[in-house]
Image: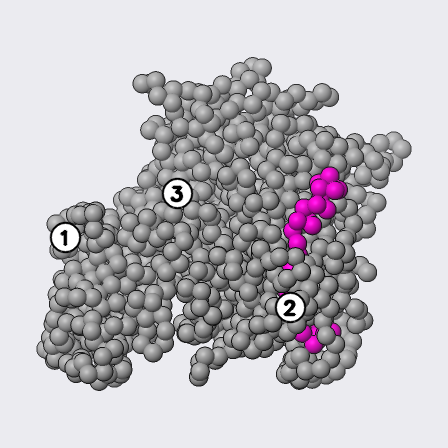
Amino acid sequence: MRPGKARRSVRFALAAFAAVVALAGCFGSGGIDPPADRFFFPTGLALAAGGKYLLVANSNFDLRYNSGTVDVVDLALVDAQIDGCLGRCRGARDEKDFLVADSTVIIGSQVTDLAVAPDGSRAYASVRGNASLTWFDLDEDAAPGTRVLSCFDDPSPGARRCDGGHEVIRNGDLWLPTEPYALLVDRDWVFTGHVDSGDVAVFDVREGRDPGLVRVLDVFPEGVNGFARQPRLDDPETPEDESGTAWYWLVSRYSSRLYPFLMSMESRQAGEGPAVSTGPSIGVGSNDPGADCRSLAFSPDGTRAFVANREPPSVVVLDTTLRDDGSVDGSTLATLDLGSGPSRLVMLPLADGGYVVLVVCFDAEEVFVIDPDLLAVVDVFRAGMGPHAIVPDPARGRAYLANFGDSTVWVLDFTPGGADFARTVLEIGTPEPPSSHD
Amino acid sequence: MTRKFLLLLCVCGCESAAVETTTRQMDSASDVALLCAVETRNEDGTSSWAGTTMDKCAKDADPDGTLFAFVVQRYRGELAAVNLRDRRLLDLDLRQPLSSPVVVGPLPNAIAAAPDGSSLAVANLGDPRPGDDPTNPDGVPFLSVVNPANLLPRISLDAGRPFLSRVPLPVPASNVAYLDSTHVVVTLPDLSAVAVVTLGESPVVGPPVVLEPFPLLDGEGNPLPGLAVPWSILIDDVRGRLLVGDRAAPWLAVLTWDDAFALTVAGLAPDPYQLPGPAIAMALEPAGWGPAGDEAGRWIYAVDGRSRGVMVLDAETLTTIDMSTGDPLEWRNELIVPGLAQDVLIGRIEQDPAPTEAEPAVMHGTFGFVVSSFGEVYAVDVEDHGNAACWDGAAAGEGNYVETACPRHVLRNGIAGAEGPRWSGEPPAFFQAGGAVLSYTGTPPDEYPRFADFGGETPEGDPTYGVLFDAEHPRRAVSQTWIVEYEGVLPWTDGNGGQVGEVGWFRDRAMPFCARGVLAGDILIIKDGPDPLDETADCSAWGAVGQETELEYRIADAYADRLLLETVVGADGNEDPLPAPDCFPWAVRYEVRVGGQWLVRGESTGFQHHVTVGEDPDPTNDVPGLCVEAPDDAICTPYENCTTEPVDVRCLHDGRATQGLVYKNPFLCFTMNGGTSVSERGMRWELDATGGFAALSVETGALPVAEALDLTTETGPALLVVDSSSDGLIRVDLQDFTVSDNWP
């Protein structure tokens, strides 16, 4: 199949899915159970805190099955495979050879993002199909034959559906809004951003408690699309691991601004859980119109924000240095043109102490590598069909890329000075483009 | 796209329809260079081409050259060419369908043409991968050198022609410029160096000249700061020097070269080595354009990689010209355009015949052209050519609008006739706090505050209504709506996370009060009523529990993240007691209003202030410094009248008008007098100003990044702009400053 034809089919799948949702409005009732050993339209990736496992969220976007899943990839098997190929493996590998047997869990369809808590004990997924925050217990040290990932009380192996206790859809009369899309997991709080309303749901996970929906913020613009936590190494009052005083930022697909906010339990809102202090937003001052911000990430010291913007397709670099008066500098340093449809952007620390910024362009099917010192794109490489989710693995000098369109996960090498820098060294999953509707 | 599809699916079912699509010719264009070439007809009916000097592309030149624009495309690694005479995109590779470019190298970032047209050099920022290219198995970075004679149209019938040679480099190059027709200089950011490449049959790469650490010491033997990421290059061959700008360091390296083209580091510039920002792109006024006719280029325009404005440097001393002294709109010391300046050029444009009237869009004289990331190109009068009297080089002053008729280095006004600022046809409307609307037509009722009556008329015959613009200098006004409101809300001070502390303290860690312009004497309004944890607590002094309210306090002291409050008799006539934490244990919503003053805000220019955080008297505690005005009132003394100039230009950045005193900001001046009734919170005048300065610009795609100037008399004058996003190469006709063609 020619790439252009495949892309059309992806879009058709998106449209068909939306139509099915509109007409049917139900999920997971009967139908075909999803496979436990296949990627199918992956939309979320997350790395376990200890680096042993990669979690892959499969969205079941074409509703071929009655549910989505989260698979567990054993990265030791990935390492061995790459070592066996002397650093670069050619050809696709069957994903089932890398999955941890009997650790797949079944979730609602249309999962949009996946993240692991900083302490590594849990993972979370935002799921549009059942409008839930679905959460998982994660045990990296699980003995062989026991579950790495579970979302039910029964610890026995096997692919099973998450129970209701692991799907947070409400807290009393407070309901999670529809269309959870963006996800940010920190030590004390979990946030979901909702694309159709601009709502931000706040979940309290302090001191290891089960996630409880405690607030729904409605002060942000419609189309909340991405979150990031700003490291504040320049502010001694804000230690890196103190999420209680951390600044969070979000972007929206209908806005050209970045919105900061702080969380506080000490001065919580009457009857509404934690207090949220919203700071003055800063604008993407380089692009016209500059709306449709999709994703953002900060430099390791928090003094620069990188924003993936679609109008026009670009990465906008902003100075987020804290001034003496407590305000953020906010000036725009650069805007770098990209291929069409930038969707996700991550910062990858490198072994040499530097870092690069990786931007995934869904429509162009390319990944752009940005050198923050040059403020320039220094590498571009082809991805699979419809690349979307990406997660860095700094310890291994890698990143993992999920190709939504052909249901594969690629392993990208970012060893500084290495011959394979910014190159795919392993393709996991048998490419399976969406079936044609022409 | 998906929504449209879905709609179609739902409403119409399946239906075939014509699909419009653009055949893309260029993609992610990153730079452009112009080259003149001459065609020779051979006896066998074929043609051959040879690059030549630019003067051969003049009208009636002999031989008659053709001008080509060569465009590099960053992500495809390709080179495309456009024949600017017949406006056709060339098919450089006949083996491919459509108008095909050719591959030159990975991530081409810059292109330059030899002065004699013999070659083009392309700096590739990409690092080739070992094994990807059989002809470059080790993945050695290289400079691409293109032989235009083998690339131009008819010769391209010969497949496999040797149009491209690769000069191996130690690391990828970010930029390239020609010293002469066979020597180019390249910046090598990975080595913090520059190097000279000698072109020819066997190209030679000279030793990299490392700029970090800088190879020179200062007069006291201390190391000079270096250029870690050398990026831009400017060759001033008349002065025999090469300037290198850095991506981050705000200074220039000055180098010279000898007869063998060996580079020598001469020093840093300016002295002391401090520019407002790093120079990431530079342009020099060509030699011979000054009054004497034979002097070296006088000005350098440099894109500031920090502010992304344009610095103006004296080309002799390499010091920046302070653009802030004359025009408050350019107080940042630079030429500021919407978006980020991406590239800049200087050129002298002479219309033939010379125009008799100085219309804004008619380019006749010396101009700078600034490419903005906003998809626009802005014109700068290097020497004011906004009126015909200045065309012959009348008295000029840098950026000074006040004293001279022919200012230098000013954004060109795009308003025809430059009629100057004035009121719109709609007179100011007076809004009472209660919502009634009064017009300023005629005489406002005495009981209401109003602008002082200066008793004059504008040149257009409009009443001034006591608000004055500087009609002689239209750049001092912006067409926008002004709102002048008594005790108005300071913009961006509506918070939702205020914490009530003991004895009048109020804190919101997310709100930078000083940065928002809050000062002692302003008013804090708490919008949430009490909501005690202890239901038996008596909080009735602040109203009903859990209800919205408006509790008013005077700000005794303002700090970066907190306020110290004191009680005040509020607008409702009541004095609310200081909030107690027991009754306000939760975060509250709030806003800040100016106290007893008129807040002046322009819809485009916003609320201006010069409030900053003062010195922290005790760094051992977490209380930051006070919010203070800098300069303070001792310097920013009241104006006697509207012609009084401020002692410090920063005093003009003020959005607070005190009743009965002259108020002045960079845009307007007035005095608000009280009426017979006391001014009430929320009273405001709202008025439209028109005829203000609007920079002359032309739209050039979505994300333009570079430009070239066609000053030939055959196809020019024109500006060739490359848009990295959508429009490819765009030709701006400088006869009327409009887009005349593009190759997307």
Label 1: which secondary element: loop
Instruction: Give the left or right position of residue A406, taking residue B214 as reference.
Output: right
| Badge 2 and badge 3 both on one subunit | no
Rendered position, A397 above or below A155: above
Residue B631 appears anywhere in the view = no
Residue B633's disc is 1
Q: Residue at x 20, y 73 (%)?
A: B582
Identify the magenta region: A62-88
Instruction: Give the left or right position of residue A389, taking residue B670 as reference.
Output: right
Q: Which colour style is shown? A: one colour
Three-letter amino acid code of the residue under disc 3: His
The verdict on residue A69 being magenta is yes
Three-letter amino acid code of the residue under disc 2: Ser
* Residue placed under numbered mark 3 in the picture: B409
Q: Residue at x 58, y 70 (%)?
A: A151
Rendered position, A384 above or below A217: above
Label 2 close to label 1 by CB (< 8 Å): no
Residue B272 appears anywhere in the view = yes
Q: Position of residue A264 (x, y in %)?
A: 34, 65
* Residue placed under numbered mark 2 in the picture: A156
Q: Chain of mark 2?
A: A
The label nearer to you, 2 versus 3, is 2
Q: Residue at x 59, y 23 (%)?
A: B196
Picture quadrant of residue A110: bottom right
Q: How many marks?
A: 3
